[in-house]
Image (cartoon, grey):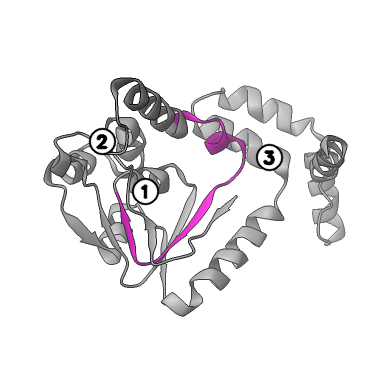
Amino acid sequence: MLLLQSGEVFCAGADLAAPGNAELQARYSGDLFRLFAAPLWHAKPVLAAVRGACAGAGVGILCRCHFVLAAQGAKFGVTEIHSGLWPFPYYEAMTAALGGRRACELALTGRAFSAADALSFGLVHELVPPFELEDRAMQMAQTLAALSPAAVSAGLRLASGGAQARALWDEALQSPDFAEGAEALRERRRPRWPSAKSGETEKRARE
């Protein structure tokens, strides 16, 4: 999954003032927490390409992504503290991505920080010139899309803490994708992942 933006702001954060009554506010808060706990973060690689500004919950989304590109000159901020809040919905994701001490500092100060800072903190994996951002994002997405879906899915389950490494390893050694990968390596050709074909079949069946 590739997250791109259409304007100069990737995300301005959650509209915390939007809910007009307690019931709507509770529903809105529930949706926000469900967003950061959603299975989609563990199902397939999620990439983001950021330019301009990204604040609040937008930073949380980047912390959940597996690969983040940012345009040089982009600005970031964990801004909830300025509204009298702590970024509870995505604080766990932020500590996992940035480390506890850095996450606490950013949440506590609510300060703006640069793309270079985001790279050094580990929020962003790569900086590119603004005019190259979408091309580089598409290139990275295509690179990940060419990998074994079965291997990627198993790896993301392990990374999310939802499975044991040895069990996944033993399962992978018996998988059709591993057999195909080993054969392709011996034959010096590009692998044709069986799990990619089965995924396409299931998608067509749902349609």
Q: Which mark is residue 151?
A: 3
Instruction: Tell whether position 82 is magenta.
Output: no
The percent position of residue 170, horizontal first and vertical second, equals 70, 26
Three-letter code for the amino acid on which mark 2 is drawn? Pro
The residue pinned by badge 1 equals 58
The percent position of residue 44, horizontal first and vertical second, equals 61, 42
Q: Give me the C-alpha separation between circle 1 and circle 3.
A: 28 Å
Q: Give me the C-alpha separation between circle 3 and circle 2.
A: 33 Å
Residue at point 83%, 36% (across, down): 202
Q: Which mark is residue 127?
A: none
The residue pinned by badge 2 equals 87
Mark 3 in CB contact with mark 2 (< 8 angstroms): no
Residue at point 30%, 72% (across, down): 73
Mark toward the start of the polypeptide (1 vs 3): 1
Q: Nearer the viewer, mark 3 or mark 2?
A: 2
Three-letter code for the amino acid on which mark 3 is drawn? Ala
Three-letter code for the amino acid on which mark 1 is drawn? Gly
Q: Give me the C-alpha separation between circle 1 and circle 2.
A: 11 Å
Residue 72 vs residue 41: left or right?
A: left
The percent position of residue 72, horizontal first and vertical second, equals 35, 72
Neighbours of disc 3 within 10 Å: few (<14), some (14-19), many (20+): some
Q: Which residues are magenta?
A: 37-55
Mark toward the start of the polypeptide (3 vs 2): 2
Residue at point 36%, 43% (across, down): 60
Check the image and report above or below for 102 versus 8.
above
